[in-house]
Structure formats: C-alpha cells, structure tokens
Image: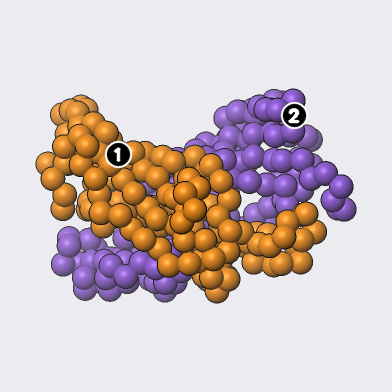
Amino acid sequence: MALDSSLIGQVRPGGTLLVTRSRLRLFAKATGQTDPLFTDVEAARKKGHPDLPVPPTFYFGVDLEMPDALGYLREIGVDPRALLHGEQEFTYHQMAYAGDELTSSSVVADVFEKKGGALKFLVTEVPIVNQHGTTVVTMRNTLVVRELAGVKA
Amino acid sequence: MVVVTPGTALEDLVIPPISRTTLALFAGASGDHHPIHIDLDVAKSAGLDDVFAHGMLSMAYLARLLTNAFPIEKIRSYKVRFAAITPVHGRPTCTGRVREVQDVGGERQATLDLTVTLADGTVTLAGEAVVAVD
C-alpha cells in the first residue's frame, strides 16, 4: 500500500483509553493547566460534573493508545520523521470524564498532494465512542508528509 | 465569563518558554510518543537542528484560553491549522476574539477566531471554535 487516493474509504480500528484521574492530572501538568476543574474532583463536582472532565484536545490521544501508533503509517510507506500535523478539528457531542473508556476508529476521508507531490496530505475522520457506545467526539485529522531529502532510513 | 458580542477579545494567555521537560511530560500525558519531539538524535537524523514542540501542545494551550472563558460543556467545536513549527524555548501567546454570534437550531452560538503567536510574531496556529452562549 502507498499513500495515495486508493486509501480513501479505508477503515482501521483505533485505540482504547480508560481515562484515569491521574492521566488527566498529568495532562494538566504538561499543559500548564492550573484550573482545579481539571485536577480536583471536588472542584469539578461543584461545577456540576460527575468527575474530572476530559479537556478539549485530550481526545487526540485515544487514537494513539495502541502498541505502535505509527505502524499504519509505515505500512503505507510513510517515514514517521517526515510527518507534520496540518490541521486538527474536534466536534463535541457529549462530555467525557475520568472513568470513561474511550475507543477510536478511523476512516480515510481524503488524500491529496501539493507542490507537485512534495507535500502529501492524509485526512482521516475519527469518531470516539464511550463505553456505552455513544459517540462523544468526532475528530478530523490532517497529517502532512513532507519529502525527506538526503535522509537515511 | 466574558460578555459575548462580535469583536469581544478574550484575555490573552501568555505561556512561559517551552522546555524540553514540558515536551517529555506532554509526550507521556498526550500519548504522542513520536521521538521527533523528545529525542535529539531522531530530530537530527531527519535533517533538523533540534526537536520541536508538538502542535497538539499549542492546541492544548489554546484550549485553556477557551475553558478560561467558557464552561467546557459549552464548547461545540474547535479546529486549528498548524501554520508553523514551535521551537524549543518558544513563547506562545494565545489570543481569541468573537467573530459572530448567531442562533443555530435554537441555541445562541458564538464563533471565535483563535491564534497562537510566538514572541517574534510567527503565527503557529490559526483556528476557530464555536461555543454556546447565554
């Protein structure tokens, strides 16, 4: 397989992430988030949430929660070092909280090129469902693959 | 909460210089273990002088701007385009401004223009969010 338009419509399974309070607290630490809503269960409950809420961009990691998140890119001939993140979109349907188990899947929505093929774009639609089968978020990920001129494999 | 009318600016969010420690923590916390953000050897093997920050780290900073101003459960959508790489020690500033407010399916929604800019003026992220407002 190669990164070309023949991939459009291809479906692959994604990752599964049991969201823990400690993982959300680490995410808050890493992103400089000091709002207790994201680290203190009592603070979250006072604002009407059942537990620590999943922050808006944390969902991106659900689809990476597998032994080799870059494996499918290698399968289509992409050197992970050539990757850039082009665009990222989240559409929110329902809240998710610590304790939820989130699962992603992915379908290739588009593949195209710019600059005479020097940049290739891979667009995937990634719905994320919770343990009840409810879709909580839909992501649209655009990855860019640049040319790695003169670089050894 | 902010008063939401077109042109209203959110309070800027100024981020301290991004350290290598932050990149390591974010790799673990976000689940993005791509070595190009945390391993200088891999970055150099790709022809780069240094590692660079995850785009999703800046998108997370920009999301803090949103959740500082609006209840998280009111955010309907959020998207960005990554316009430039953020180097180690980069100092992002997140800004947001209300573009329009309209009724959508019986809900009053504000659309915000969002930007992350480095200290030298480089725009690294440009995007928008839709939030439900009173």
Question: Label 1: which residue?
Answer: B112
- In which quadrant of the rendered view does residue B127 lie? top left
Q: Amino acid at mark 2?
A: Gly
Residue B66 placement, left or right of A88:
left
Which residue in the structure is indicated by mark 2? A117
Mark 1: few/some/many CA within 10 Å (<14, 14-19, 20+): many
Q: Is residue A124 left or right of residue A53?
A: right
Q: Position of residue A21 (x, y in %)?
A: 38, 71
Tell me the quarter of the image containing the N terminus of chain A: top right
Color scheme of the displayed model? by chain
Q: Secondary structure at mark 2?
A: helix
Mark 2 Cα within 10 Å, few/some/many (few <14, many 20+)? few
Q: Residue at x 77, y 40 (%)?
A: A147
Q: What color does chain B have in the rendering?
A: orange
Image coordinates of residue B108 in percent, x first then y, are 17, 34
CA separation, marks 2 and 1?
A: 34 Å
Chain that appears purple: A
**Disc 2 chain ID:** A
Give whichever of B68, A23 is nearer the camera. B68
- Secondary structure of residue under mark 1: strand
**Subunit that carries the residue with mark 1:** B
> Residue drawn 36% across and 43% down?
B114
Q: Position of residue B36 (x, y in %)?
A: 68, 59
User: Residue at 20% of width from left, 67% of height from top?
Assistant: A45
Task: Determine which quarter of the picture holds residue B60.
Answer: bottom left
Compared with B71, A98 (above or below) is below
- Find residue A74 and report its horizontal and vertical position in percent: 76, 47
Rendered view: A127 above or below B12: above
Residue nearest the viewer, comparing A9 with B89: B89
State the image quarter where residue A135 is shown. Answer: top left
Identity of the amino acid at label 1? Leu
